[in-house]
Amino acid sequence: MGKRQLPEWHKDLKRCTRLYEGFADAAPFFTAMYECVQTFFESRPVNPGPPVNLEEAEDSLRSGTSLQLDLQLDTQDVVDLLQSMSVVLAEANPDLKGPAGVLREYAEQLIMDSPERICKQNVRDLCDRLVADGDWEQDLATFVYTMAMSSFYKRCLQQPAAALQTGLWTEGHCPLCGEKPHTGVLRADDGAKELECWLCGTKWVHTRIKCPYCGNEEQEDLGYFTVEGQETCRVNFCQKCHQYCKIIDGRKLKGGGQVFVDIHNLASLSHDLAARQEGFTPGSGLQWVNAEEMACR
Ligand SMILES: [Zn+2]
Ligand SMILES: [Zn+2]
């Protein structure tokens, strides 16, 4: 058997353990989760999403209208992935045995409620309920929700995401699925700000001096800050809508190549905390900060 090629997230996982303080402790957990998802899909290929008419898509993008693809996923597939993730959660951390058990129960309930098909909102509701019922921390719920859903979306929408003429797109939300990004990069080669959809992985260049969430272009309202010693990640904020996103400065990364921003996002959650403490909310709507972290500032 040939040597297995290292997955694309692997390089940034290593990079991030050097770049972000404290991430080395969390890296084995995230490695286990990424490997779990990868193994899951190796034995279960997904069906591609609905076909996208590229000509119509072009017109749509030109007029500033996202295609808003909302996938109807096979409930059993989603539940099986959540079950696999729950096993790894419990193995990785004994404290998570209880929460992992609750996830399994809730996932079973999904099958009862919607035996055929579900959409991302159903899974979001499930994760919100885990937090509201006091069984889960917010950051874990957001992680499981984004990881599970993006792993389906990225696989199902791989073709249209690659074929889409994103150069025509100037908005701040995703041209393909409509979600608002949480992260982006400053590209190493030209310094352009490239936003990336956390859900389907579509990337598009966005004007640097512009808020992706409210469209504000007033330079004095827009800024960024970083966390000391971890300047690779910037918190871009807007003082008009008081929202933020995180931008990874690719020019600072040694070794070049593609930046796997999801890993940088996980490695820089202290930036999210800092942003919240400064009074900004995530423009993506993804809450990565636990309520008690906010309380003990
Ligand atoms: Zn998207
Ligand atoms: Zn704004």
Image: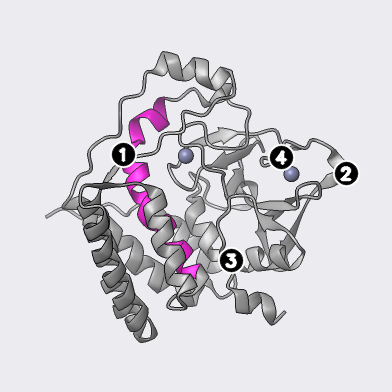
Whole-percent x, y for residue 201 in the image: 45, 42
The disc labelled 4 sits on which kind of residue?
Cys
Which residue position is annotated with label 1?
156
Tell me which residue sits at (62%, 79%) in the image. 292
Can residue 289 be seen from the camera position used here? yes
Q: Nearer the viewer, residue 106 or 21?
A: 106
* Secondary structure found at label 1: helix
Residue 269, label in figure: 3
Residue stretch in magenta: 139-163
Instruction: Say few, some or many: other residues with alpha carbon within 10 Å of mark 3 (under 14 / 14 to 19 / 20 or more).
Output: some
Which residue position is annotated with label 2?
220
Q: Residue furthest front?
A: 113
Tell me which residue sits at (70%, 52%) in the image. 243
The disc labelled 1 sits on which kind of residue?
Cys
The disc labelled 3 sits on which kind of residue?
Leu
State the CA–CA distance, disc 2 to disc 4.
Answer: 15 Å
Question: Where, by quadrant of the figure, is residue 225 drawn?
Answer: bottom right
Report if residue 140 lies within the magenta region: yes
Whole-percent x, y for residue 81 in the image: 26, 59
Q: Which comes sooner in the sequence, label 4 or label 3?
A: 4
Whole-percent x, y for residue 175 in the image: 51, 31
Question: Where, by quadrant of the figure, is residue 84 drawn?
Answer: bottom left
